Image: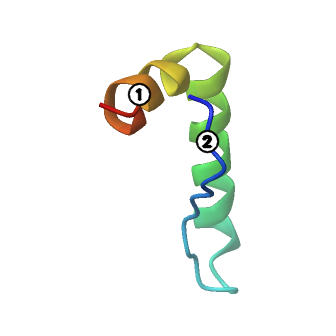
Amino acid sequence: VFTDESYGIAVCKNKTDLLDKINVALKALKDEGKLKELETKYLAAQ
C-alpha cells in the first residue's frame, strides 16, 4: 500500500517488555508477508 500516512502504537515508557513483544510480532508479520496482506485488505483505497 503506497501511502504517506504513518501509524503507531503507544506504549508506556516503563513497559519495554510490551514494546519488545509488539516489535517481535510486527517483524514476524512482515517477514511472513501477512502485514502486506493486512495493509492491502484494510488500508487500501477503495
Q: Nearer the viewer, residue 41 or 19?
A: 41
Q: Nearer the viewer, residue 26 or 16?
A: 26
Q: Which residue is mark 1?
A: 38
Residue plotted at (45% across, 18% down):
37
Residues at marks 2 and 1, CA–CA distance in whole angstroms: 14 Å
- Check disc 2: other Cα within 10 Å, few if <14, some if 14-19, many if 20+: few
Q: Nearer the viewer, residue 34 or 41?
A: 41
The mark that comes first in sequence, 2 or 1, is: 2
Q: Which residue is mark 2?
A: 3
Q: Give left or right: position of 19 versus 10.
A: right
Q: Which mark lies nearer to you, 2 or 1?
A: 2
Q: Quadrant of residue 32?
A: top right
Task: Find residue 33 and report its horizontal and vertical position in percent.
Answer: 57, 14
Please, what secondary structure does the residue beneath circle 2 have?
loop
Q: Give left or right: position of 38 versus 14.
A: left
Task: Find residue 40 and report its horizontal and vertical position in percent.
Answer: 43, 24
Question: Looking at the picture, which amino acid does disc 2 mark?
Answer: Thr
